[in-house]
Image (cartoon, helix red, strand yellow):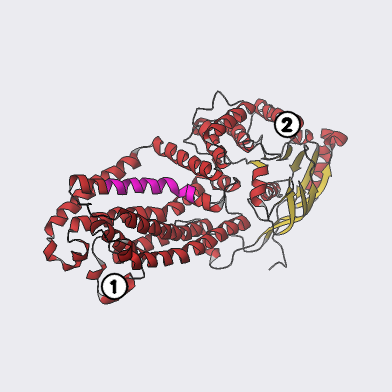
Amino acid sequence: METWNLGKTFRPPTWPLSLAGRVSKRPVRALAGLSLRVEPGEVFGLMGPNGAGKTTLLKVLATLLLPSEGGGRVDGADLVRQAGLVRRRVGLATGDERTFYWRLTGRENLEFFSGLRGLSPAAARRRTDAVLGSVDLVEQADEIVGRYSTGMRQRLAIARALLGDPPVVLLDEPTRSLDPVAADRVQVLIRRLSRDEGRTVILATHQLGEAAACDRVGVLVAGTLREVLVPQAVGEEGLRRRYHALVEVADERPQPVAGLP
Amino acid sequence: MSVLNQLRAFLRRDYLLASYSRLALTWQVFTVVLVAPTLYYLGRLIRPAASPHLAPYGGDYFAFAILGVALFGLLAASMAAAAAAIRQEQMVGTLEMLVAAPVSLPTLAAGLSLWSVLLAAAQTFLYLTLGVVVFGIDLGRANLAGAALALLLAVAIFAAVGLFAAAFVLVYRHSDPFSSIFAGLSALLGGVLYPPSVLPPVLRLVAEFVPLTHALRAVRLAVLEGAGLAALRRELLVLLLFAAVLLPLAGVLFRGAVQYARRAGTLSAY
């Protein structure tokens, strides 16, 4: 996965599109000049304060957002021109619990999303069973998602990201709101995705411990990539100190851009 | 094969969601059972000789009206389905994940509409079955192939208008006003419960620009009078023209709306 000079600016819509609702009156630059290369099989962490652009970057990589400038490739497929191909090669797990049908069971949800990947009902069942096993949700598979705990929904989201057997997995705060035991299980799963299955994992996180387990960590501040750190080289404490130094010298939120039309 | 599997997945999901609460299904059956006899007894008020406007359609008001109501229900569902489904996905929070899946936009639009359209088609079938079996509509002369062709073109036209509505929902994240306006005007001018020939001359002229007018005229002539393709040619050509203009336009607009939402970052917003 690579990006070059990737930028995303949210511009206020002009009339009549502005009738859609309240929006910022000035452009907001969420990502700027982001050039990055993540090697196959690598676990790459994205850290940064709230609003630094982590989720925006993951959504651009999943083709849910169009970049404003620059470009990128995921497993060889162009983010803008080959969005359909990128979607086949990427699995995305967002931190949003509302992305499932709460009246359906975990299994029914996954079979539906398998079907969207073009799998026949029989193949969808097999694939669903396999990914449910990967995230230890087999026993709860036939309960409706509305009764799941937050941790179970997080694991279900990871299971959904794996349905297409993608070479690249994007995880947005996969351990947010999880208790330490559940978080450890997700950590083990992430390592397995990378080391045993050879997938590239890009994960956004606020947890220093989680970041320390990554091969490399990119620190995003106000939409720009400030530094790429190697946790094995600097250690968790070194990572913490450097992260704080980078974040504390910068205003952490995306800023309206003066001078942009 | 892949597209069929994707459509099957949408259909199964919507069936499962509908099974969770069977109230909507029950209500749809109840509506038919209530409306069909109402139209039948209304029809008994209007004798064939009393209205020359019904003469081209065989003179039976009940047969005229039940075809209008049954087909309008199907066409209205074809139009409203995609926009309503997208609004629902926005509210539930699942729209972003649907777009993240490798599903083409035409398949996405069709998949989101399929269940509602099939349900409306079943309702239409129930209307017609009741009309024939219980209330004695004579289908002995019906040209079903001609009627099916007109209906297919009409569904395509209404689905295209539905894509305009879906594009509106994607951009504005609000229920669209177009479906209701278009459905209301179509019902008023298109001849659901009365032939457009009863309208004043100006409205009769406007009615010629309403696709429903031609769809209902073609289907009624084919079903009630057994009109062949030659007799239906004018109506079918007009419907074809509407479809040829509206479908590509709607496709472009829907694609543009998805691109706009990807640019503005509003796929996950509601």
Q: Position of residue A107 (x, y in %)?
A: 53, 31
Q: Is residue B177 visible?
A: no
Q: Residues within 10 Å of mark 2 (few under 14, many from 20)?
A: few
Q: Secondary structure at mark 2?
A: loop
Comparing A105 with B58, the one in front is: B58
Q: Which portion, as a residue range, is magenta?
A: B110-127
Tell me what residue is drawn at x 83 percent, y 41 percent. Answer: A229
CA separation, marks 1 and 2?
A: 68 Å
Q: Position of residue B200 (x, y in %)?
A: 25, 74
Residue positioned 76% across, 48% down in the render? A220
Q: Chain of mark 1?
A: B
Q: State the residue at coordinates (62%, 33%).
A: A159
Q: Is residue A14 left or right of residue A225?
A: left
Q: Magenta includes A82? A: no
Report which residue position mark 1 lands on. B204
Magenta segment, prevailing SS (helix, strand or loop): helix
Side of B94 where B63 appears, left or right: left
Which circle marks residue A197 in the picture? 2
Front residue of this view, candidates A27 and A156: A156
Image vertical order of residue A244 relative to residue B86, above or below:
above
Q: Position of residue A129 (x, y in %)?
A: 58, 28
Please name the residue shown 38% across and 63% down the image.
B182
**Circle 1 Cα neighbour tier, 10 Å, few/some/many (<14 / 14–19 / ≥20):** some
Q: Chain of mark 2?
A: A
Q: How many marks?
A: 2
Residue B113 counted in the magenta span: yes
